[in-house]
Image (spheres, grey):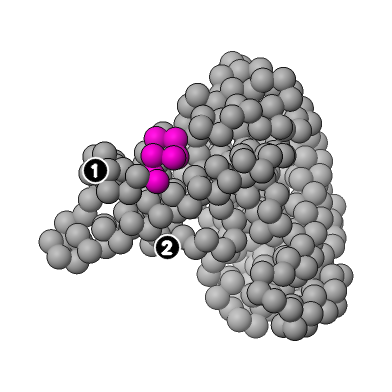
Amino acid sequence: MLKVVKVRLYPNKEQKQALEQSFGNCRWLWNWGLDLMNRTYKDTGKGLSSYDVKKMLTWLKKDHEWLALTYSQCLQEVCINLGTTFNNFFEKIARYPDFKSKHGKQSIQYPQNVQVKGKTLKLPKIGEVKAIFHQMFEGKIKIVTVSKNRCDKYYASILFNYGKEKPEASTEGRAIGIDLGLTHLAITSDGSKYDNPRWLNKHEQNLKIKQQQLSRKQKGSNNPSKARKKVARCREDFLHKLSRRIVDKNQVLCVENLHIKGILKNHNLAYRFSQVGWGMFCTMLKYKAEQGGKVYLEVDRFFPSSKTCNVCLNQVKNLSLDVRTWSCPSCQTHHDQDINAAINLRGEGLRILTCGTRG
C-alpha cells in the first residue's frame, strides 16, 4: 500500500545552488519538449510520445552541457510527465499543458536512488540534505518530489510502499450522505451541520493591506504570498480534521459529484465557492476512506437530491437556492433542504451499491 510523507528540507548554500540548477534544467526541458511537441503537431499533424523526447536527451546534453549537472533520472521523469499530461488532455481529464515559469513553486522528481539516512535525505548529485521527519516510516521509497515554494522553503514529498496490503473495502457499517454548501461546509444525513469557517473573509483585510504594500515595494515581495499561505494552511488543517472525523465515524460515504470547475465559471459566486475548498475536502474524504477499507461513493450531479422528498419520493419542479426549508405538497413533511438532500444522497448511494447501477 502506498503512502506519502511530506518533510521539510534545510539545504545548505551549495545544496540550494544545486537544487536551483536542477529546478531550472527540468523547467527548461519541459518547456523545450512542450514547444517541440506543439511545432511537430502543427507541421505534421502527428504528436510525439514521451519516449521520443527521452531519446533526444543524449544529444541535448552534448549541445547544452549544463543539463548534465542534473540527475539524469530527473530529466527522464520530466519527459514521462509531459507525455502523461498530454495523454490526460486527450482523454479530457486535464487541460492542455502550460509552459513553466521560473516564478512561483518549483519542483523536481527523483524516481529512484533516494535514501533516508538518520536525519537527512540523500539525493543524487545533491548529497545528504538535513530534513525534519515528523513521523518515521519503513518501506521502499517509490518516488520523491522535491519542491520550493514562494517563500523559499524546501520540502520533499516521499511516496513509499510500506508493505501492507490495501484493506478491502467493506459496506458493513454505518452509511452517511454528505451535502456540501456555502453557509455550512458539510451537512450530513444524520442532521449534523459543520460550519464554513470562511477563512478568506477573516483575513481579507490583511491581504488587502499587504497587496497595497506590495504595489509600493520591489517586485518579488513575499508578504501577500505569506498571508495567502497562512489562510491556505488554516483551511487545509480544518478540512483534514473534519474529513478524519467523518471518516472515522462512518463506513459508507455518499457525496454528490460536483462539477467544481463549472461552478467557478459563475463570476458572481466564484469568490465564495473558491474559498470553501469542496474539491480538497472530497479528495481527503476519498483517500482516507480508501486507506481505512471504507467506501467513498459519488452520486451523479444531476440526481435531484434537493428537490425530492425523502419520505414519499415526490419531486417538486422548482426550488430556488435561497429556499432553506420547504414542505412536501404530497405528504406535507416539512424539510430542511440541506438535510433532506443529504438523506437522499445516502439513499441513492445505497441503491447504487445494492443494484450496481445508477438511475
Q: Which residue is mark 2?
A: 98
* Residue 76 among magenta residues: no
Q: Identify the residue at image location x=75%, y=30%.
A: 133
Residue beneath the point at 84% across and 62% down: 197
Give the x, y percent position of residue 143: 52, 31
Q: Residue at x 77, y 68 (%)?
A: 223
- Nearer-the-camera pick, 224 or 313: 224
Residue 81 placement (x, y as % from top left): 40, 45
User: The residue under label 1 is which amino acid type?
Assistant: Trp
Q: Nearer the viewer, mark 1 or mark 2?
A: 1
Q: Main secondary structure of the magenta part?
A: helix
Q: Amino acid at mark 2?
A: Asp
Residue 228, given in percent of the width and then of the height, sits at 75, 65
Numbered label attached to residue 151: none
Q: Would residue 158 be found to the left or right of residue 84 on screen?
A: right
Magenta residues span 66-72
* Quarter of the view holding residue 259: bottom right
- Do we see residue 322 in this rendering? no
For marks 1 and 2 on the same chain, the one whose residue lies earlier in the sequence: 1
Question: Gap in Å between the C-alphas at discs 1 and 2?
Answer: 25 Å
Q: Which residue is mark 1?
A: 59
User: Foreground residue, 216 or 34?
Assistant: 216
Say what secondary structure mark 2 lies in.
loop
Residue found 50% across the figure and 24% down from its top: 113
